[in-house]
Image (tube, rainbow, N blue to C red):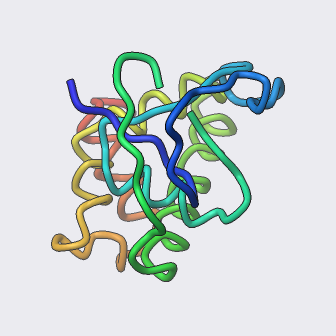
Amino acid sequence: MKVYHGSYMAIDIVDFSFCRKRRDFGKGFYVTKILSQAELWAARKGETFCTLKSLQAISKAAKYDFAYKLRNISKQIILTFVADKGFTHADAVDKLYNSKTFTQLADKTTQLYEKDWSEIYKLLLDELAIK
């Protein structure tokens, strides 16, 4: 499986001493199988995220506007999952980032990120069969 780590610089060796303790899933080196999500992480200059099986370093995110919109839509959906559906933050993050809806949202060519977050939230609810 190919995974990506979002950072503003290349990382040759994973050094867990640089990983922060208070993250969504605890101290660790986080990766994603979604390139655009890693690009979003990379857009957060100065922060590093984390690899489990393999590591692909990526350079700076292509467009901040896209990354900004993607981050804000994701944040709103996660907060709404927690507030309205009673999910834990970790479960909300997992449901969003592992969905087909997020894969489409993270694909710039679909331009789904141009829609209001509530429309995307409804698509996600339909996909996950959540009322």
Residue closest to the eye, 23 or 89: 23
Q: Which residue corresponds to the image point at 60% horizontal and 53% vertical from the top-left?
A: 75
- Against 61, residue 26 (above or below) is above
Residue 124 location (% of width, % of height): 33, 45
Q: Which residue corresponds to the image point at 23% horizontal and 62% vertical from the top-left?
A: 107
Give left or right: position of 79 versus 126. right
Give left or right: position of 98 versus 96. left
Q: Which residue corresponds to the image point at 43% horizontal and 50% vertical from the top-left?
A: 38
- Against 57, residue 44 (above or below) is below
Residue closest to the eye, 2 or 66: 2
Residue 85 location (% of width, % of height): 57, 31
Quadrant (top left/top right/bottom left/bottom right) for the C terminus: top left
The single residue placed furthest to the left in the displayed view is 109
Quadrant (top left/top right/bottom left/bottom right) for the N terminus: top left
- Against 3, residue 72 (above or below) is below
Residue 62 location (% of width, % of height): 39, 76
Residue 101 location (% of width, % of height): 27, 48
- Against 73, residue 83 (above or below) is above
